[in-house]
Image (cartoon, rainbow, N blue to C red):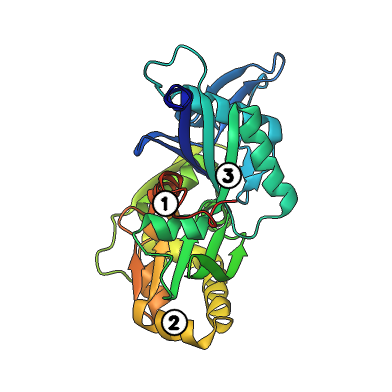
Amino acid sequence: MGLFSFFNKELAIDLGTANTVIIYNDKVVVDEPSIVAIQRDTQKIMAVGKRAMMMHGKTHENIKTIRPLRDGVIADFQAAEYMLRELIRMINFHNSIFPPALKMVICIPSGITEVEERAVKDSAEQAGAKEVRLIHEPMAAAIGIGIDVLEPMGNMIVDIGGGTSEIAVIALGGIVNNKSIRTAGDDFTDEIVEYMRKQHNMYVGERSAEMIKIEVGSALTELDNPPDEYAVHGRDLLTGIPKEIKVNYSEIAYCLDKSISKIETAVLNALEQTPPELAADIYRTGIYLTGGGALLRGLDKRLHAKTKLPIHVAEDPLRAVARGTGIALKNFDKFPFLIK
């Protein structure tokens, strides 16, 4: 048995629309953007992760960059398989002469269909997994931020990722009710691209819009500690000449308002459907924010104004789901019904 366990390697994977995080031996060993660069004529993989992201929007006709996941689910099956295989290769399995037998736990959106679930499992198996289990993202996020999900206490998790926003009420080791909407970080980025085009007659790429979101993204038009203006470079739509424009957080808050309102509505809908006893618990415990979207300035205050409930932003929201998946993997016996 000891010999077999020596060849078995256990991986916890947060297969995200924007980033993929892999945990091995309780350590984050891979944290890369979910993107692949492929040569069109030979179908050869040129780069994965950060290197592929550097090529994104800068390729010639023989190279294409693919983001295999859209809205939290696999959109390009083959590219997802390539990406997973290459990311697993980045892990240094010490003393491994033979390819290890991989046991994986992968987190998935709670609103996923059976077909989409199957696609995740198949991609993992094609990438070399011998055993694949799945866990829902809000449950993984709750475990990752230290909530005891097995207690008879209601907790509400709002996990805003790249492709989906997951809102779930958790108690007794299960999801009591959940709302999964396909409005999240990617929509914020698209709205910034559209705003720059309409408001400033400037065309910016996806990567530039992502940087605007990180540097001056906000959910409120007035902040206590506002960030400095950010210089954006792009192409003038009237002259076709590259130019620079400075944007501030207030105009980005204005442009993101529509998407944030959709998330607020989904949170209110989830609260409406919560059983009264659990609603009483949530009044005391509040709402926990995880995922990259939780880093948006002022989002906690805006949600508090809407719900009048305490809002807690996770300590490391980007990796909360991955950490929870890792804990579930280590405690297979303790959480047998969480992972299917």
- Binning the other alpha carbons within 10 Å of mark 1 as few (below 14), some (14 to 19) or many (20 upward) gives many
**Callout 2, which amino acid?**
Thr
> On the picture, is 309 further left or further right than 339?
left
| Measured Cα–Cα span from mark 3 to mark 1 | 14 Å
Front-most of 252 and 338?
338
Residue that badge 2 annotates: 307
Q: For the residues carrying marks 2 and 1, which lies nearer the camera in this image?
A: 1
Asked whether disc 2 touches disc 1, contact meaning CB atoms under 8 Å apart, the reply is: no
Looking at the image, can residue 337 be seen?
Answer: yes
Label 2 residue SS: helix
The residue at the far right in this view is 115
Estimate the spatial distance between the alpha carbons at disc 2 and disc 1, rounded to whole Å. Answer: 26 Å
Q: Amino acid at mark 1?
A: Gly
Q: Position of residue 315 (x, y in %)?
A: 30, 57
Cα–Cα gap, marks 3 and 2: 35 Å
Of 245 and 298, nearer the camera is 298
Q: Earlier in the sequence, mark 3 or mark 2?
A: 3
- Residue at 48% over, 27% down: 8
Give the structural element (helix, strand or loop) at label 1. helix
Q: Are marks 3 and 2 in contact (CB under 8 Å)?
A: no
The image position of residue 288, as x and y in percent, is 39, 67
Q: Pointer 1: what residue? A: 324
Q: Is residue 32 above or below residue 320?
A: above
Amino acid type of disc 3? Arg
